[in-house]
Image (tube, rainbow, N blue to C red):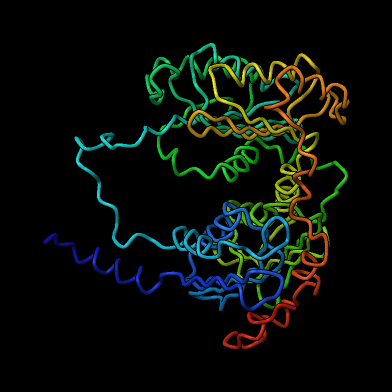
Amino acid sequence: MERYHPSEVYELFVRHMNTPRVVVDNGVCATATLVQVHSARKHGVLLEAVAALSDHGVCVRKGYISSDDGRWFMDVFHVTDASGRKVADADALLARLESSLTADALPPRTPPAAAVGNGAGPAMPTLLELVGADRPGLLSEVFAVLHDLRCDIADARAWTHGGRVAALVFVRDVETGAPIDDAARVRRVESRLRHVLRGGALGARMVREDAAAVNMDRRLHQLLNEDGEAECRADQADATAVAVQDWGERGYSVVTVSCRDRPKLLFDVVCTLTDLDYVVYHGTFDTDGDHAQQEFYIRRLDGRPISSAAERRRVIQCLQAAIERRASEGVRLELRITDRRGLLAYVTRVFRENSLSVTHAEITTRGDKAMNVFHVTDVAGRPADPKTIDEVIQRIGTESLRVDEERWPRLCSTEGDAGRGGGGAGIFSLGSLVKKNLASLGLIRSCS
């Protein structure tokens, strides 16, 4: 029998006592699935819950976050699928949440050196992080360089905002499918791509460690924040209303967000607050039609509220940028085709030759199938000419490339009676929530 050190046994006991409890209930509310998460407080656990919901593809219609300001918190989410209906696979959603939130039973042990890399599954591709100044045709140049350097692209995601671009690209050797870890080759790839990106705070770098654990959306937010993109949009007109106020009586800073609803909005806000090292103690979020209203009561990790005008301005800028950078501009094109060498270099070259600029890209490869999404505009950032789009489709293939008529930013708008039923009751009053006895579950059981 394997024996554990007393410290490991104690850690097992603590983890057991603090294991999050998750409930997914389709019977409480007529128009939405109710998700409840009860957990011991840990920095980042709220983000883990919200990320699990986003990864499952559900839309958060309304909900609240509550804490005793001590060691525990409770989250309640009213969620639907993208069509505004209850979540059909409630058991799968429960399993995803429990997997994301539940810690391992025991601390991981380092495997023997001989066993490392001897697993049966394919090796994890190498992660390539890119940041630089955006310009028309940039993504085409990046994919062309990778093709020339015999790097196969397994998955990728790219965002543009505020004149900057950030991308995460998982690459492997085109011949063997192995990760790219030869030092000389890594330097050559990074050097060529830095030249294409023409400078930037980060430029291009390869990441080998912990690539499998990367949340791509969170990392893209981090890269653009590190690059200073949030400050670059400070003088732009604010389509997104973000305010930060003080509640000195309780020692909180109060963050309010009012904007158009869209997929992953709650994730983007919570992700930004978490990466800025703020803790959300209480919060409410609600949707009405295609409008979202959110309110969060936060403190810094040291327990103090926001203390200066500069810090308040930084929070506002970062939240506005995080919300706006995912609001994809342009025509949404979906490419579903058998994968082949140089596919992305060819497709993006066709875009460039037809004066189309890619504002967002999501590249996915499953087996021999490529499932890619591109948002494109003309080179000036205006809507693309329909004739140009038609010519591109004809050139790439009408069976493979198509326009998604239902715009992605509208997927999670609460259109119709079913959608409105999930969030039309108005935003919760957090002032009353703080003062209520949280042992009462009246709010949890309510769908109105």
Residue 403 on image: x %, y %: 77, 33
Looking at the image, which is closer to me, 262 or 198?
262
Q: Quadrant of residue 413?
A: bottom right
Left or right placement of residue 43 versus residue 262 in this view: left
Q: Which residue is at 53% across, 16% downward?
A: 191
What is the tally of numbered marks visible in this picture? 0
Q: Which residue is at 37% across, 33% downward?
A: 122
Q: Quadrant of residue 252?
A: bottom right
Report if residue 117 is visible in the image.
yes
Q: Quadrant of residue 335?
A: top right
Residue 3 on image: x %, y %: 14, 62
Looking at the image, which is closer to me, 378 or 254?
378
Residue 137 on image: x %, y %: 72, 19
Left or right placement of residue 339 versus residue 401 in this view: left
Work out whether 208 lies above or below 350.
Answer: below
Left or right placement of residue 25 versus residue 254 in this view: left
Q: Going by the picture, which residue comes out furthest to the front?
A: 399
The N terminus lies in quadrant: bottom left
The C terminus lies in quadrant: bottom right
Report if residue 43 is visible in the image.
no
Looking at the image, which is closer to me, 70 or 99?
99
Work out whether 14 lies above or below 329.
Answer: below
Residue 195 on image: x %, y %: 60, 15
Q: Going by the picture, which residue comes out furthest to the top?
A: 148
